[in-house]
Amino acid sequence: MKNIRFDNVGFQYSNELTALREISLNIQNGEVLGIMGRNGAGKSTLIQLMNGLLKPTKGNVFFDGITTNEYDASILVQKIGIMFQNPEHQLFSSTVEEELNFSLKNLQISKDLKTQYKHEIIDELNLHSLLGKSPWNCSGGERKKISIACILCRKPEVLVFDEPTLGQDKGGYRILDTVINKAKQRKQTIIVVTHNTEFAYRYLDRLVVLENGRILADGPTGEILTNSIILENSSLIEPQIVKFKRLITESIPQQSNVSKLIVQARTFNEIEMIIRKSMGDTS
Amino acid sequence: MTFSQPNPKDQINAKNLSFVYESVYKANRDEISAIMNKEGEKPSDSPDLDKYKALNLINLSICQGKFIAMVGDTGSGKSTLVRTFNGLIPSFYRGIFFGYVGVFGKDSIQEKISTLSQDVGLVFQNPENQLVAMTVEREIAFGLENIGLKRELIQKKISQILEYLGISHLRMRHPYELSGGEQQRVAIASIMTLEPSIIILDEPTATLDPQAAESVLNLLEKLNKDKKITIIIIEHRLEVILPYCTEIIIVQNGQILQHASTQEVLNSDYLYSTNVRIPEYIILFKKLKSNKIYSGIIPSTIEQAAHIMRELIS
């Protein structure tokens, strides 16, 4: 089982700032997990410990049963692909195709297989029209797509996204939606660092909430994001659907059948259907 | 397209504003030169030039004391547009500039950036890019020294602004030791101390956690209400900004698609035709309205939405 395990991990930066303390965490193969918490809680440090960019100063991080200290850094970076916040930091080639070639360059596979991997990702993310373009002449959304492609083309076993929704319009969201749903179908492990509770509520199954370098909460997304004490202590806000249902029900002592149905709804689309039905709209 | 009418209280006034970045010009020099040299046609109006323009024939008036959200798809021209308001375009970001931008009646091309910066303060998404000094005090002093104030007056102004923003305790701290929210407050303080009439913020809360983001927005609301400072915020997350803004400007393909009150924007169709992510409670009411199940206004906040929904189902 290719899981990631943190065994009583601590991490201290060279300036003596302790970023993480006593982290014990088990992430199973195929999990869709979110890491949340306020600015400076230790989220980015945690993901950099996963692929060996940082080494723990206390305890051990295991990938597939082997500590990250024992892995060759280039192998681990290939197995755990991290997409950082600013795609610009990852792109430097003169064309999009060269960028993909560079991503595949250090993979220990045949030339033919590299070409196959490249064409698979071009088709999957529909990159054909961008191949000859400079990444710098692409829009923000396109650059996001290219940086995702550069990670995905190496077929990592674990996909890590650092604040993927930042600065994204609907177009950027659609790309993310496609990538995450396809990774879910492949039963790939997905780890997302985010402040965005809307995104977490929609896509992530389990949340780990960090506060001041420690794990404050770890559990199913639906439980974490409806717990006002956890939200208050980690600088998070309720997802819109949770807040909307709470506001509707808290001031209606006698609940009607419709309001009871609304409380059970998971999405605004479901609420729309309930209202339309209750108003006799069957279209 | 809809435009607001010019008003004597206008602080910023753009007329037929178009802009082509120098990098785009260099990459397409022959084609652009041929269009510019065409006889009998004003080059800025030529539709052949549209695909090269980051801004395309913008007409816009911004009045005093508004709290404005500027929204639009990524790459639509929002950041480019606000950089013309304090002269960064075309003085720093160079290119071909057509039309006119007036800031308090002063031509942005003719005025020095240092003069315009005292009217229009710009805060970027990542405060780290804006903070250069070794302490918060030195950071705030930097702008004041550049306009030639005396040391005693500088110290007094620093104390006043730190106290007003509730960050006096950070005075001797290194800006890089601060949290993202604290850094953003320091960046706002260093702009505020120059007493601009307009503060423009390019996604100021994008990297902040939700509660830190709310505290920065509350601070901007206070500046807007107490000191009548005009606030213009570029923001992708409508749900974050809707409780605060009184007007919305939608930028699309380098043009102004709509500039109107928040209520008017939510209740017309332009916003819904863009790639801007719209809060789901707004989409819910928009759909109910389209299906003639609901006929009132589209609510701007989730509290309003829940209130209307309670009435609808009771």
Image (cartoon, rainbow, N blue to C red):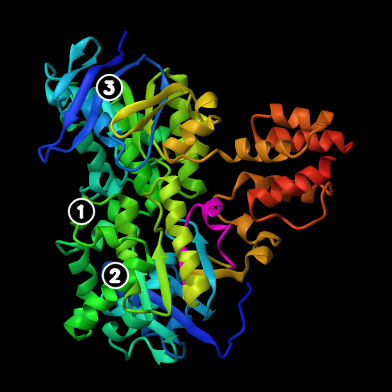
Q: Residue at x 35, y 73 (%)?
A: B192
Residue A52 placement, left or right of A138? left
* Residue A151 painted magenta: no
Q: Check the image and report above or below for B113 versus B215.
A: below
Is residue A206 at least partly visible in the picture? yes
Is residue A111 at least partly visible in the picture? no
Is the residue marked by circle 1 packed among few (<14), some (14-19), or many (20+) residues within 10 Å? some
Q: Which residues lie in the magenta part?
A: B231-246
Front residue of B4/B39: it is: B4
**Residues at discs 3 and 2 in contact (Cβ within 8 Å):** no
| Residues at marks 3 and 2 on the same chain | no
Kind of residue indicated by mark 1: Tyr
Subunit that carries the residue with mark 2: B
Residue bearing mark 3: A23
| Residue A13 x, y percent position in the rendering | 14, 36
Q: Residue at x 11, y 41 (%)?
A: A15
Between the C-alphas of marks 1 and 2, the distance is 15 Å
Rendered image: mark on residue A164: none
Rendered image: mark on residue B176: 1
Residue A261 placement, left or right of B152? right
Q: Quadrant of residue A282?
A: top right
Secondary element type, mark 3: strand
Q: Residue at x 48, y 42 (%)?
A: A173
Secondary element type, mark 1: helix
Residue bearing mark 2: B190
